[in-house]
Image (cartoon, coloured by chain):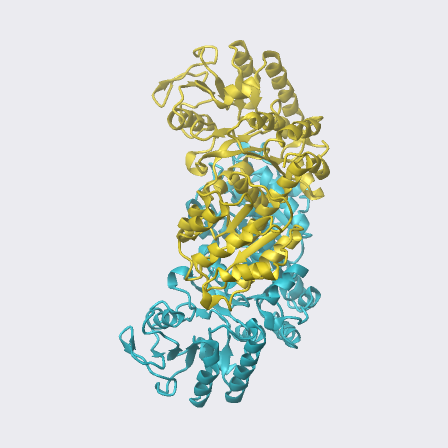
Chain colours: A yellow, B cyan
């Protein structure tokens, strides 16, 4: 889609709806972001003229220069059609409409939205919104109308996010930033009057810098569910698409009515259809985070359900086993020979204390070399499809280098390896050691198991379509 | 139990198993903690004598002074019976055995453990362990054998924790510290040869400074399950007891065998029995955290299942509705009158944008006063048993004072109020504003709903036994 390319890579922008009296109005917040954070030439527009941040304000799109790629509109709903008409006449191809007061507010708003769609259709304008918080592309474009201090500056990365809820999107960006996961783009789709979730899925599907696409969806408009799965069927051959559906319970579905009401009454695409087309469904926000982090790392396959688990705490092993069982993942028993091979790698004094069953519990006496040695043997076992490393680094023999050391062992094999390390400042060296060497770190045991479950779902689909 | 009182409040301690050559041996770590962190007179003991940290080392318990209240033992398993014999002869009543190599290692270890139990029985010694990481009482006692930098210094508070897994316990302390929840004590129960989980439940049940008791249990020894529920039946009349059971899946149960194997084969007390006696069962570690935080706050009752939900993001409202539905909690529809009353409290310009259905969505235009006004009306509604405040503070009109402001409104009514605020440094002022005013803050929507579910379980039980 040409329009989306222009929207996400503008050279010159304009903001319609800056205020000369209130520097904190949404239009002004967006204007300052585009100018000073994104360093984009940006024209402020307000019918009353004047100046904003020392720049002359143009009275209309018509009066502004001709080189505008993207217009962000933040004016009361009733003025939006007029502004769009001017954009069309000026041959502007990309518009983001922040303004609310359309189909989400009832009948009069819905007819206003129809009017908007007619104009964008007539001129071939690619529009995101209305009733959205904007679009964010790290180091490039930020049209969120929220003050900078209210939204995390998530770093540039490879996960693209599309959301029907602005609040949900902001929350994910905060969380991703705090877990050091980068994003390629974050899209608040709003009422999705013309540009739909599937348009962005298609766009990011073709973008080689995007490794995974994440979407929060409350419902689909007429025919959009079908289009969504059709597009996903193509995209999921190349990269994972993860969906969290809001309003799955009956009560939750009713709650969507007062939120994204334009989608009311539309059929929710069934989980079975998602599964059929390789769309990975997340059950809740924790799982979204697990998958987002997992798929921001280079994919390693997991050809079966069998996990080898390595821990320094028996209790953690037990909890991981319970969790894995919920997802139908197995901890196969290690053969006597394999147990002996693992035992032989461990410091002699502790060979009698450690357990080499699965989970393999090296106890609080474990050291880095013990951990490395056992993992090396474990990853060579043919009935082990993935390794789960539980690494609460409370054991005094575990050093801060363990992440890098163990990750370097994991590199030798093309198998899924996921680590659990609590996400605390004091363990940052360990987490970075793992992650710069390609091993994602979960911050709970549950998240680690969810990550393995995610990669298993992905591998299973690729196996089914003959790509693994 | 007199012995536990002595153990948790010692005036003078001794550590058997300090090393004069390795300052990082477990015994030395414990010795330094008792001396320098807890400021307790502590005698170091090693048959070879010498000095440690400038103090003369006694060659045996026998040779040490007579005023010892608590002995911590960290010597190879085979020497433990001899040390205990000396403790008994010296009339020492409290002992913590860190050493591993007992029933958890198989038959020979089991007979050593029997020997230990005979000695403690003969002399009436209260013993925790063997095979434990120790006991921690903030500002008083720390016998964890882990270096200080490996364990969070959780602040003093009102939640007591007892765990069959040392790793699990350390992990909880880290997490509680990071969420600013204090603990009254943290007990690694180890093999529970003599002192059982139920002994500590009874002890903390009688301790007025403890508001909630949390236990991680993989299984019970012969008759211990029955004793546990009997004691809990008494304690839960006074305060909540929360249990996470490890090894609930068949695979997980097998994994407990190589961990706390002394408990192998014992019947796992059924969830139904837990329910009958008012024990609150947590499904996973997230729920443990939710309950621990919730019950560290003064309890407010929740007399029915009905929640009024207040949000600034429609998506968050939808997700909360889905979550609540899973727990059988309801968001009752607000009457037209009540909706009108809420609408009347909101800034006129936004009355048309906000939705006053349940969840009530004030949108990103909401301000502190809007939030306060609507909550005031909501808490007065007789078909609302609790309020759930979803407060991603991304809305520009929400100030950092909102926590305290809203909490002060909540104070006027004796109903459960729980807030969701992301646990980020930049929102610390908001979170503190809520929490010093008695409203617990969850760091995910799911956790907030789990908290409400926890208080509902508690209130339901109190209603059943006629105490609410």
Whole-percent x, y for residue B461 in the image? 66, 65
Quadrant position of residue B314 = top right
Whole-percent x, y for residue B50 in the image? 29, 79
Quadrant position of residue B319 = top right
Q: Residue at x 50, y 62 (%)?
A: A344
Whole-percent x, y for residue B228 in the image? 62, 73
Q: Residue at x 43, y 75 (%)?
A: B74
**Residue A309 vertical position relative to residue A126 in the rendered view, above or below:** below
Residue A80 appears in the picture as rendered: no
**Residue A16 vertical position relative to residue A391 in the rendered view, above or below:** above
Query: What number of labels is visible?
Result: 0
B23 relative to B229 in the view: left or right: left
Q: Nearer the viewer, residue B358 or B158?
A: B158
Could you tell me which quadrant the N terminus of chain A lies in?
top right
Could you tell me which quadrant the C terminus of chain A lies in?
top right
Whole-percent x, y for residue B211 in the image? 53, 66
**Residue B158 vertical position relative to residue B380 in the rendered view, above or below:** below
Q: Nearer the viewer, residue A340 or A57?
A: A340
Q: Nearer the viewer, residue A436 or A408?
A: A408
Most extreme residue toward the left, as rendered? Answer: B54
Q: Residue at x 50, y 45 (%)?
A: A412
A230 relative to B411 in the view: left or right: right
Residue A411 appears in the picture as rendered: yes
């Amino acid at each position: 889609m040409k329009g989306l390319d222009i929207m996400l890579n503008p050279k010159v922008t304009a903001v319609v709806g800056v205020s000369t009296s209130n520097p904190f109005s949404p239009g002004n917040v967006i204007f300052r972001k585009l100018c000073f954070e994104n360093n984009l030439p940006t024209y402020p527009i307000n019918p009353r003229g004047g100046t904003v941040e020392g720049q002359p304000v143009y009275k209309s799109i018509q009066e502004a220069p001709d080189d505008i790629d993207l217009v962000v509109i933040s004016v009361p709903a009733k003025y939006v059609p007029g502004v769009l008409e001017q954009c069309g006449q000026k041959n502007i191809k990309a518009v983001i409409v922040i303004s609310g007061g359309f189909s989400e507010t009832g009948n009069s708003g819905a007819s206003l939205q129809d009017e908007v769609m007619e104009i964008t259709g007539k001129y071939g304008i690619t529009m995101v919104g209305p009733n959205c918080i904007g679009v964010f592309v790290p180091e490039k474009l930020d049209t969120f109308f929220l003050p900078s201090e209210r939204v995390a500056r998530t770093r540039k990365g490879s996960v693209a996010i599309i959301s029907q809820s602005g609040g949900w999107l902001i929350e994910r960006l905060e969380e991703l930033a705090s877990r050091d996961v980068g994003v390629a783009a974050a899209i608040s789709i709003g009422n999705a009057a013309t540009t739909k979730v599937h348009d962005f899925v298609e766009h990011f599907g073709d973008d080689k810098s995007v490794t995974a696409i994440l979407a929060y969806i409350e419902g689909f408009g007429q025919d959009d569910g079908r289009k969504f799965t059709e597009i996903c069927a193509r995209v999921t051959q190349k990269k994972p698409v993860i969906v969290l559906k809001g309003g799955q319970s009956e009560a939750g579905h009713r709650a969507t009515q007062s939120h994204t009401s334009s989608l009311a009454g539309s059929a929710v695409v069934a989980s079975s259809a998602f599964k059929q087309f390789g769309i990975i469904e997340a059950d809740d926000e924790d799982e979204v985070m697990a998958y987002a982090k997992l798929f921001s790392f280079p994919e390693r396959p997991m050809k079966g359900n069998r996990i080898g688990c390595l821990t320094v705490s028996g209790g953690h092993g037990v909890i991981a086993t319970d969790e894995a069982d919920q997802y139908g993942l197995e901890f196969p028993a290690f053969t006597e020979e394999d147990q002996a091979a693992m035992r032989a790698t461990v410091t002699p004094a502790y060979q009698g204390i450690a357990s080499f069953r699965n989970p393999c519990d090296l106890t609080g006496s474990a050291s880095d070399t013990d951990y490395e040695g056992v993992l090396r043997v474990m990853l060579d076992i043919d009935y082990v499809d993935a390794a789960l490393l539980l690494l609460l680094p409370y054991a005094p023999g575990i050093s801060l280098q363990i992440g890098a050391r163990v990750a370097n062992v994991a590199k030798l094999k093309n198998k899924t390896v996921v680590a659990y390390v609590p996400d605390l400042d004091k363990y940052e060296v360990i987490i970075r050691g793992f992650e710069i060497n390609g091993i994602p770190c979960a911050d709970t045991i549950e998240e680690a198991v969810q990550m393995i479950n995610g990669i298993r779902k992905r591998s299973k689909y690729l196996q089914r379509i003959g790509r693994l």
